[in-house]
Image: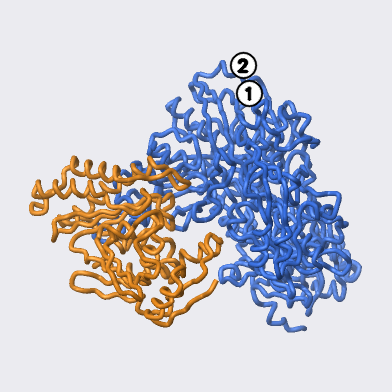
Chain colours: A blue, B orange
């Protein structure tokens, strides 16, 4: 028997690097585990320690001998014709290898886009938003590249800007995109509207007559940034066959590939992509950023080109969460039953379409929230404006709607003099409830139970700032609004409590072919069976690689699982977004493992079938490196079954198909699965200064099945905090006159610090969805929905103010 | 850009005399941000980090001579008793990493109205020790701030130290930001009671083109305290006095609307902070105040 080599007994070990790859590029991760480490266990992430100790190689850390640095020159105005571009001085700069503008693009295709290819790789005679890429430079030093870019002279002729619905849809409005020919233009009322989705069900006007109370509200949701900590970065290396190797931090390799290759004029097999270390995403890496620019410069110069944005550029380098204006009307009978809902949601998509059509689909179809309302009249639109482009961000569309409908629920409960939680529970959807699209919810929907759980928690103690000192004579300002800024010692401080619950779809909807691919290989190495899982799934920090190893251990009964770097040599895994990866790529890994297991058993039957009748008659499992019967009898070692053979299977896997929403009625089975979370927020508000301290954000969420309970907790706490951020501080501020971004830095785009982070107790329910692998539910987004309105409700509770806007700022709370 | 690295204070003064446009750099917490974002590209950077004495302080009979590069974290750790207002202000400066690097000299050199130290320095009363090859002078803090990001230094002068009056009474400092830590001031207020002279001094940050004192508020309060015999009888300050003090502090502001807040809010908040900090310091003077945990 072979002795197990020492390396494999470590929790994580990395394979040696291939010689020609740049430093800092991903390597295989072999995860061993002293325990079984299957699904349901909180196995630790292979990247966790490396990230905490600063050793993890992010995409910005990559280095290649002889590489150049790319720099982007961006527009300083929001809307203008480009009269002229003079690159001569930049080109003449010592150390500069290439300067490229629109005229240098090599292929017929010069645009890209997730759904509508409306985004020029480099500005084509016109810029449509502040910070649009106009030219790119490659030089032998980043500072040289930056200075050369600054020497490019661009003459702009400024155009009027459209920045909101009124200016964008005015009869004489300047068109952001002239000559649109995309598939939405036929059904939108104005060319500055990207997409419109109405949903009509029942008769809202008729049902309104049954209402004893009607409440209306106008709500405003500010522009949030994903603010991932690893800025956009990547390295393009030209290859000998005329193609290019691109190492990049992204959310979806194959979607990038489909947009990159046509612009380079290359077939997709000549653009080979590998995922490099991703420092967060939250939707902000769904769109192309520096990918095409780096490849263009690499192919032009014949040298590897690295591009890394700094934080300032990052604010212009990716799309943001759609700011929204939402008008809602709800009615209820005096015994608290909702009668109808009418809403109109206007999302600002900014200058390019990005994910706007899908955001409209979500906002409209989820606008009613987790409530039973049969009569609805819904309309959602996304605008084209000269504001920064907006697209995917955690919970998109659903987040904005949840903020508004939950404010409405509180207004209704107040008007009916009912408890806000009981009112919600009375109207909560359940399994079987029809959504406004006519689609039934066919898995557990424990909305009332989630609310019950957060409400049942004991409240955190009052006035904790007084209990810090032993003798009760001191004040701990860290427990007060204003924190270390020492603005109150209790004066003006009022506590408030608020509740919210939300509904998010999981996976890509509206008929999208939302498949994933997994390649699973099983072989014997050093006498031990090892599984290799190869997918193109972007690990952006969500913990997908951990879960894949757990699935492989569970399905294949092996201890050692190697996670192959994600690249485009395997089929698409779809996007790491929409709470979908554990469901879809996890499902694909499970499916491929099952296929491998069948092959292993076939092999076993061929080899050993004659020695034991159970090979033919019993249910056989793979456990602990052995083939066992369901009765626990060991039939063979996997090592003996496989011997020198490797079983290697790549399969696509699909969840149940969905349908498009009808363009006039919004009816259709558009969604795959739903995810529910509820929050209770406890805040202390300094009512005189308008400062807020969120004390506690308790969450209850149904996760179907927690494949990795520790990761589940991390997702829920992270989502909760991101929702809190946009409740009290996070906002990109755009000047309404110039459409220019006013705070593109972490100095003035404020993210919660650890002192702003409340206690986040989490209550996890596991009610299986029988349609999903292991019964699991996508979890990443739901907590981001209800967190924001819960905090707002708590602040309203403390202050008595109406607060129809998020984030809430001190001047709103002090009406100054 | 040339990088000058004087080994001694004398060498630094000589370098500054030779290159008056040289930008002095110590902790670099402000200058490096400007350079990294290419907001400025000085011809010369004058690195003061080799001059150890700039990071030292002396506690004298009446004053603390605080070296220009003494980091905020040292002020918090070692000078709480002598400079309580400045210690509180120091704790609101950015993050622990920045507090380990940044010092009062940088705040004064930049002279941004949002500099956290200014209101505390104005309230405590101090003089800036400015030196050049021509000699040394002490610039009263009241005459130091001359315009938006402008100060009274001559082109060949460097800040060597700040001579800050040791606290002879309670001091407080409050700062409003829209985050509970690590935030640039929307506005700030410092107050210091000076029982020895029976005066109160104040400082306001981020609510005017320069850091300012709320002089009318001080004059009103000083008169009211004297008239009511408050310094001797230690009575609770009447709400009417506190209210008027707050209103005058508010009125001293000349703020702008910007991305961090509105002018109206700044005026409002300064008034609230003035009223509260007056209450805290006076309660402490009377011997009834609460101590602070978690803040310097």
Q: Quadrant of the C terminus of chain A?
A: top left
Residue B209 is labelled as: none
Q: Chain of mark 1?
A: A
Q: Quadrant of residue B148?
A: bottom left
Query: Could you say where residue B22 lies in the image, as x and y percent from the top left?
Result: 46, 70
Q: Secondary structure at mark 1?
A: strand
Count residues near mark 1 (Cα–Cα under 10 Å), then give few for <14, some for 14-19, many for 20+.
many
* Circles 1 and 2 on the same subunit: yes
Query: Could you say where residue B132 lies in the image, as x and y percent from the top left?
Result: 35, 73
Query: Could you say where residue B55 lies in the image, as x and y percent from the top left?
Result: 36, 75
Determine the CA span between mark 1 and mark 2: 9 Å
Q: Which residue is mark 2?
A: A206
Q: Quadrant of residue A100?
A: bottom right
Look at the image and tell me whether residue A787 can be seen: yes
Direction from residue B236 to residue A51 in the image, left or right: right
Q: Chain of mark 2?
A: A
Q: Secondary structure at mark 2?
A: helix
Look at the image and tell me whether residue A770 can be seen: no
Q: Which residue is mark 1?
A: A375
Viewer-closest of A218 and A597: A218
Viewer-closest of A44 and A641: A44
* Among the two numbered marks 1 and 2 on one chain, the one whose residue lies closer to the N terminus: 2
Relative to A614, is A699 above or below? Answer: above
Relative to A512, is A300 above or below? Answer: below
Q: Quadrant of residue B169?
A: bottom left
């Amino acid at each position: 028997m072979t002795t197990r080599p020492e390396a494999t007994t470590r929790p994580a070990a990395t394979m040696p690097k291939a010689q020609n790859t740049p430093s800092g590029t991903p390597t295989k991760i072999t995860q061993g585990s002293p325990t079984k480490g299957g699904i349901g266990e909180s196995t630790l992430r292979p990247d966790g320690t490396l990230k905490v100790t600063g050793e993890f190689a992010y995409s910005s850390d990559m280095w290649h001998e002889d590489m150049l640095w790319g720099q982007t020159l961006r527009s300083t105005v929001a809307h203008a014709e480009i009269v002229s571009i003079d690159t001569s001085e930049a080109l003449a700069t010592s150390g500069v290898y290439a300067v490229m503008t629109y005229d240098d693009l090599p292929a017929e295709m010069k645009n890209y886009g997730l759904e509508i290819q409306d985004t020029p790789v480099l500005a084509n005679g016109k810029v449509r938003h502040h910070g649009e890429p106009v030219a790119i430079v490659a030089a032998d030093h980043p500072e040289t590249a930056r200075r050369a870019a600054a020497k490019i002279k661009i003459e702009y002729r400024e155009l009027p800007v459209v920045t909101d619905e009124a200016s964008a849809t005015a009869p004489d409005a300047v068109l952001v995109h002239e000559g649109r020919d995309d598939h939405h233009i036929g059904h939108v009322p104005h060319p500055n509207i990207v997409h419109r989705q109405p949903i009509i069900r029942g008769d809202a006007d008729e049902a309104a007559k049954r209402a004893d109370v009607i409440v209306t509200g106008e709500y405003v949701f500010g522009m949030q940034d994903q603010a991932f900590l690893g800025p956009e970065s990547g390295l393009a290396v030209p290859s000998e066959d005329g193609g290019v190797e691109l190492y990049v931090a992204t959310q979806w390799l194959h979607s990038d590939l489909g947009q990159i290759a046509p612009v380079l004029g290359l077939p997709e097999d000549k653009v080979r992509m590998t995922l490099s270390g991703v420092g967060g995403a939250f939707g902000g890496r769904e769109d192309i950023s520096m990918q095409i620019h780096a490849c263009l410069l690499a192919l032009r110069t014949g040298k590897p080109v690295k591009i890394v944005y700094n934080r300032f550029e990052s604010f212009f380098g990716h799309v943001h969460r759609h700011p929204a204006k939402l008008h809602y009307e709800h009615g209820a009978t005096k015994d608290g039953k909702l009668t109808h809902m009418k809403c109109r949601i206007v999302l600002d998509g900014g200058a390019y379409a990005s994910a706007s059509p899908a955001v409209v689909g979500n906002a409209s179809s989820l606008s009613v929230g987790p409530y039973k309302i049969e009569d609805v009249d819904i309309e959602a639109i996304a605008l084209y404006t000269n504001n920064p482009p907006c697209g995917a961000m955690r919970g998109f569309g659903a987040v904005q709607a949840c903020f508004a409908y939950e404010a409405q629920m509180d207004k209704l409960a107040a008007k009916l003099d009912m408890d806000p939680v009981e009112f919600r529970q009375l109207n909560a959807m359940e399994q079987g409830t029809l959504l406004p699209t006519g689609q039934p919810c066919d898995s557990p929907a424990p909305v009332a139970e989630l609310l019950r759980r957060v409400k049942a928690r004991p409240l955190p103690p009052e006035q904790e700032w007084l209990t810090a000192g032993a003798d009760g004579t001191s004040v701990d300002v860290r427990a007060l609004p204003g924190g270390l800024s020492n603005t109150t010692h209790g004066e003006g401080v009022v506590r408030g409590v608020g509740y919210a619950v939300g509904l998010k779809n999981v996976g890509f909807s509206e008929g999208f072919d939302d498949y994933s691919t997994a390649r699973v290989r099983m072989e014997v190495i050093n006498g031990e069976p090892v599984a290799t899982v190869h997918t193109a799934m972007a690990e952006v920090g969500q913990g997908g690689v951990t879960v894949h190893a757990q699935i492989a251990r569970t399905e294949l009964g092996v201890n050692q699982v190697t996670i192959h770097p994600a690249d485009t040599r395997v089929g698409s895994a779809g996007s790491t977004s929409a709470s979908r990866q554990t469901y879809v790529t996890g499902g694909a890994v499970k499916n491929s493992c099952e296929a491998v297991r069948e092959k292993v058993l076939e092999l076993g039957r061929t080899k050993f079938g004659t020695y034991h009748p159970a090979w033919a008659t019993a249910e056989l499992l793979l456990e602990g490196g052995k083939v066992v019967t369901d009765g626990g009898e060991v039939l063979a070692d996997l090592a003996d079954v496989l011997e020198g053979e490797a079983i290697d299977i790549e399969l696509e896997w699909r969840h149940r198909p969905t349908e498009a929403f009808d363009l006039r009625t919004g009816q259709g089975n558009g969604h795959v699965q739903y995810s529910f979370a509820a929050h209770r927020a406890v805040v202390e508000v300094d009512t005189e200064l308008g400062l807020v301290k969120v004390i506690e954000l308790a969450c209850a969420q149904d996760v179907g099945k927690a494949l990795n309970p520790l990761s589940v907790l991390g997702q829920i706490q992270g989502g909760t905090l991101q929702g809190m951020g946009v409740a009290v501080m996070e906002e990109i501020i755009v000047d309404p006159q110039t459409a220019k971004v006013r705070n593109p830095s972490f100095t003035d785009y404020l993210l919660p610090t650890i002192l702003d982070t409340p206690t986040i107790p989490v209550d996890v329910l596991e009610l299986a969805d029988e349609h999903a692998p292991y019964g699991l539910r996508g979890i990443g987004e739901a907590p981001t929905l209800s967190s924001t309105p819960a905090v707002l409700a708590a602040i309203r509770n403390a202050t008595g103010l109406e607060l129809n806007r998020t984030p809430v700022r001190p001047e709103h709370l002090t009406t100054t | 850009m040339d990088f000058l690295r004087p080994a001694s204070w004398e060498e630094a003064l000589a370098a500054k005399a030779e290159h008056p446009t040289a930008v002095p750099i110590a902790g670099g917490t402000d200058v490096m941000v400007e350079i990294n974002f290419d907001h400025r590209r000085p011809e010369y950077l004058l690195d003061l980090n080799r001059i150890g004495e700039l990071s030292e302080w002396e506690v004298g009979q009446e004053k603390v001579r605080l070296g220009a590069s003494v980091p905020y974290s040292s002020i918090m750790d070692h000078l709480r008793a002598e400079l309580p207002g400045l210690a509180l202000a120091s704790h609101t400066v950015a993050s622990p990493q920045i507090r380990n690097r940044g010092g009062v000299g940088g705040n004064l050199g930049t002279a941004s109205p949002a500099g956290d130290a200014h209101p505390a320095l104005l309230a405590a009363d101090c003089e800036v020790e400015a030196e050049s090859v021509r000699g040394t002078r002490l610039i009263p803090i009241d005459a130091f701030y001359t315009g938006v990001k402008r100060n009274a230094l001559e082109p060949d002068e460097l800040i060597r130290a700040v001579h800050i009056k040791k606290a002879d009474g309670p001091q407080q400092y409050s700062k409003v930001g829209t985050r509970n830590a690590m935030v640039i001031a929307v506005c700030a207020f410092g107050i210091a009671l000076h029982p020895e002279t029976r005066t109160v001094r104040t400082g306001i940050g981020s609510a005017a083109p320069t850091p300012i004192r709320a002089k009318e508020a001080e004059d009103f309060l000083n008169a009211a305290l004297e008239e009511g015999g408050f310094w001797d009888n230690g009575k609770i300050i009447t709400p009417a006095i506190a209210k008027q003090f707050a209103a005058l502090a508010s009125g001293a502001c000349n703020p702008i609307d910007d991305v961090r807040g509105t002018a109206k809010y700044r005026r409002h908040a300064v008034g609230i902070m003035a009223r509260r900090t007056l209450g805290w310091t006076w309660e402490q003077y009377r011997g009834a105040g609460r101590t602070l945990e978690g803040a310097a």
